[in-house]
Image (cartoon, helix red, strand yellow):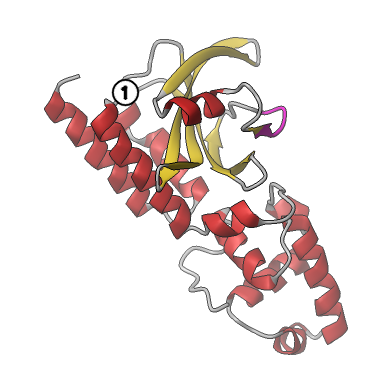
């Protein structure tokens, strides 16, 4: 790959990070963009938590690791990329099909804070930046994680993959009202429920999302793309 093409791709990659507001949106943009060429089967964004777990923050298409969570203490591609600071690729079997999995670590202050993972048809990977341009992508990825609430996810005492399926429609509505900055009393009045009910539902929301406060719940919900697009947080 010539230098001009590589620089253009790096600028494009950083632009995709800047245009995305949550992990799922970023993964969808990456999977659909020509930067990776044809053959993309799926993309995932992970954060590295303080407990050493790779926490899924967003995905689109095929999952590279559908069988459960990975940690930095396992021998997996994300851990390998975190150690080498390079783009790492391996061939694995998914649903009986050979696919390539590629991982790029994301950095903040030279420390691993996350990873981008791509699943693709064998032999289709075309974007492999060199050290100088790769570092720009890794640092931009770390800034993106911070912008969507990485610190809340990383420091949560209990890590859990949250999704709308983990909560009832009532709990999702309460979570959205929390994001609007409304107190339990106001939420109770608007939903025609008791304040005690709102408090009980809040505890269930925190447990489902692996957090301890309403601010952490709202920030993690934004990180995972669970809140409506365009919602301005007021927690």
Asked if residue 28 shows in the view, the reply is: no
Q: Position of residue 131 (x, y in %)?
A: 28, 28
Classify mark 1: residues with Cα within 10 Å, few (<14), some (14-19) or many (20+): some
Q: Residue furthest left?
A: 4
Foreground residue among 171 and 207: 207
Quadrant of residue 136 within the rendered picture:
top left
Q: Is residue 68 magenta?
A: yes
- Which residue does the image show at 61% across and 60% down from the upper left? 221
Residues in magenta, as a range: 66-70
Q: Is residue 215 positioned above or below 196 on the image?
A: above
Q: Provide residue 87's location: percent of width, then percent of height.
A: 40, 25
Q: Estimate the x, y position of residue 54 in percent, counting from the top left.
A: 61, 38
Observer able to see residue 200:
yes
Q: Is residue 17 magenta?
A: no
Q: Nearer the viewer, residue 117 or 98?
A: 117
Q: Residue at x 41, y 52 (%)?
A: 144
Task: Name the side, left or right, on which 29 lies relative to 43.
Answer: left
Please provide percent x and percent y for residue 161: 69, 47
Q: Is residue 172 above or below residue 157?
A: below
On screen, residue 142 versus residue 223, left or right, reads: left
Quadrant for residue 195, please give it.
bottom right
Camera-nearest residue between 235 and 114:
114
The residue labelled by disc 1 is 128
Which secondary structure, mark 1?
loop
Q: Quadrant of the C terminus?
A: bottom right
The N terminus appears in which quarter of the rendering? Answer: top left
The quadrant where residue 209 appears: bottom right
80 relative to 52, above or below: above
Q: Residue at x 25, y 36 (%)?
A: 10
């Amino acid at each position: 790959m010539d230098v001009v093409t590589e620089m253009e791709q790096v600028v494009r990659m950083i632009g995709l990070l800047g245009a995305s507001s949550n992990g799922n949106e970023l993964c969808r943009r990456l999977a659909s963009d020509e930067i990776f060429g044809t053959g993309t089967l799926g993309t995932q964004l992970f954060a590295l938590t303080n407990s050493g777990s790779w926490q899924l923050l967003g995905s689109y298409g095929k999952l590279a690791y559908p069988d459960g969570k990975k940690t930095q203490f396992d021998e997996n591609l994300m851990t390998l990329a975190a150690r080498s600071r390079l783009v790492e690729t391996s061939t694995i079997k998914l649903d009986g099909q050979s696919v390539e999995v590629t991982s790029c670590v994301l950095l903040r202050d030279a420390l691993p804070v996350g990873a981008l993972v791509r699943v693709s048809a064998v032999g289709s990977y075309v974007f492999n930046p060199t050290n100088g341009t790769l570092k720009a992508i890794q640092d931009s990825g770390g800034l993106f994680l911070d912008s969507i609430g990485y610190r809340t996810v990383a420091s949560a005492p209990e890590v859990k993959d949250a999704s709308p399926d983990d909560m009832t429609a009532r709990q999702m509505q309460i979570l959205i009202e929390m994001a609007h900055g409304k107190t339990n009393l106001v939420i109770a009045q608007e939903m025609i429920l008791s304040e005690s009910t709102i408090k009980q539902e809040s505890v269930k929301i925190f447990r489902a999302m692996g957090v301890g406060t309403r601010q952490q719940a709202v920030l993690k919900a934004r990180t995972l793309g669970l809140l409506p697009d365009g919602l301005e947080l007021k927690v």
